[in-house]
Amino acid sequence: MKRKSLSHKLMKKLAVPIVATIFAIAIIGYLVALEEIDEVYDSELITAANVLWLVNRDDVTNPRTKVDLKVRNIDLEGIDQEALTEYAQWRAFRLWKGSKIVIASDNARLESVLPAKQGFEDFKQDGDRWRSFTLHIPEDDMIVEVAEKEDARLELVRNIAGSVIWPLLLVLPVIGILLWRGVYAGLGDLRFFTHAIRERAPDDMSKIDVEDTPTEIAPLGNALNNLLEKLEGSLVHERMFMDNAAHELRTPLAALRIQADLALTAKNSKEREKALHELIRGVERSAKLVDQMLVLGKTKLQFKPSVKIRFHDLLQQNIKLHVPLALKKHIDLSLTGDETLEGMSQPELLSTLLNNLLENAIKYTPEEGSVTADVSVHGRHPIITITDTGPGIPEAEREKVFDRFYRIADHAQAGSGLGLAIVRHIADMLEIQITLGTPEKGPGLRVWLLFPVQ
């Protein structure tokens, strides 16, 4: 697919109105010139009619022969004589005294054509279009008719329009070149900006200098700076994650190696069986850690548009997955609250978040304890709470537990330290406010999930 050029796009956007404006000027000039010339030539017809009347009002008593307007017997130079011969044919006249034509030009209309009413008239004769002015003088019993070919007017209009249009057409290429150079020069800042970004090193996350950039490019620079800032933060977190992951995996892998060596060097079946059991538990812990790491990485690519869900139904589906573990520890696992409350969210991500919270609650709750999930609403905010009767989390550590690989020192249960980190990450993606606290009665932990306004 051919890539579009911003320069060509700007040229089209600018060239089309410029060319249209030039042609509009030419058309308007032509129409204005035609109107003005019509007025001038009409006034000349009126003047000619009055002159003919004044000249002939007292002299004409008898009919005369037609007048040859070409006047070839006048001693004129070649060019002037040609002009007189040509231009004389553009005009004609007739003059009536009483009811008879007493004087007329040789190119005037036939005598059989009666004079028109006083004023202007357009007519055709021998294929030519004419415009005439007729003057009636009742006191002198005279009628004067003066006519002119419309070609005379049109030729003058064409000459005037040509003198305007041709220079405009000739200057169009110059305008195009100047326009192209202007567009190219105007995009120079953008090319410089692009070059500066292209030449940056892959690991250079420093901000782009937008102090001297034009107003139109500055927002792009600011947006790129925001992106670079986010990328830098993401890379820092990823590096920390990789370092922590390598450290966390190194310890269980070393333990697995030790247990395997013990199984190989066991002196009897009892020692071998014990070592193998420890090896299995170590593999389970390592598999759990890897699973949690994969879940954390997957959530970054899993975000989809929100859909309407019923919170009670989604919680119920996730609670069913943890019933076997709850029964094994004789934990009372229950669900309460509004069964009809609906809202917009991302079911897959929200299920991952709820599963981690329910798993932690059941894992840290002692036998014969209880875990309760509840759905309610506060104002327009849906709320899900998960409460357990476990040891809880000291207030000083309630923010730290959301860090990756962080584990509370005196907790007996082993873990990867990624469960609540995944919960916080998904909560941020879904714009859910998460708060840790204590139940109203007794020890334990209560987790509040405050959803956006629905």
Image: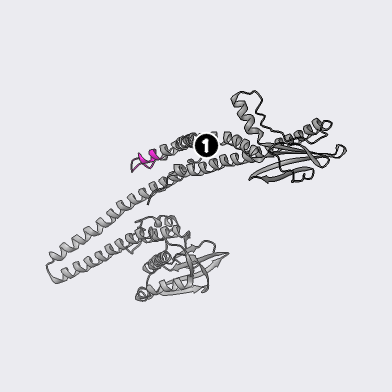
**Can the viewer see residue 410 in this picture?**
no
Residue at which label 1 appears = 169
| Displayed quadrant of residue 331 | bottom left
**Can the viewer see residue 174 in this picture?**
yes
Residue neighbourhood size for the residue with mark 1, other residues' Cα within 10 Å, grouped as few (<14), some (14–19), many (≥20): some
Q: Is residue 287 left or right of residue 4?
A: left
Give the amino acid at mark 1: Leu
Q: Is residue 120 left or right of residue 81?
A: right
| Displayed quadrant of residue 88 | top right
Q: Residue 178, percent across and down?
A: 48, 34
Q: Residue 323, percent across and down?
A: 38, 75
Frontmost residue, 423 versus 91: 91
Frontmost residue, 320 versus 56: 56
Q: Is residue 45 left or right of residue 380?
A: right
Describe the element under mark 1 as helix, strand or loop.
helix
Range shown magenta: 194-205
Classify 57 as above or below 245.
above
The quarter of the rendered structure image containing the C terminus is bottom right
What count of labels does the image hold?
Answer: 1
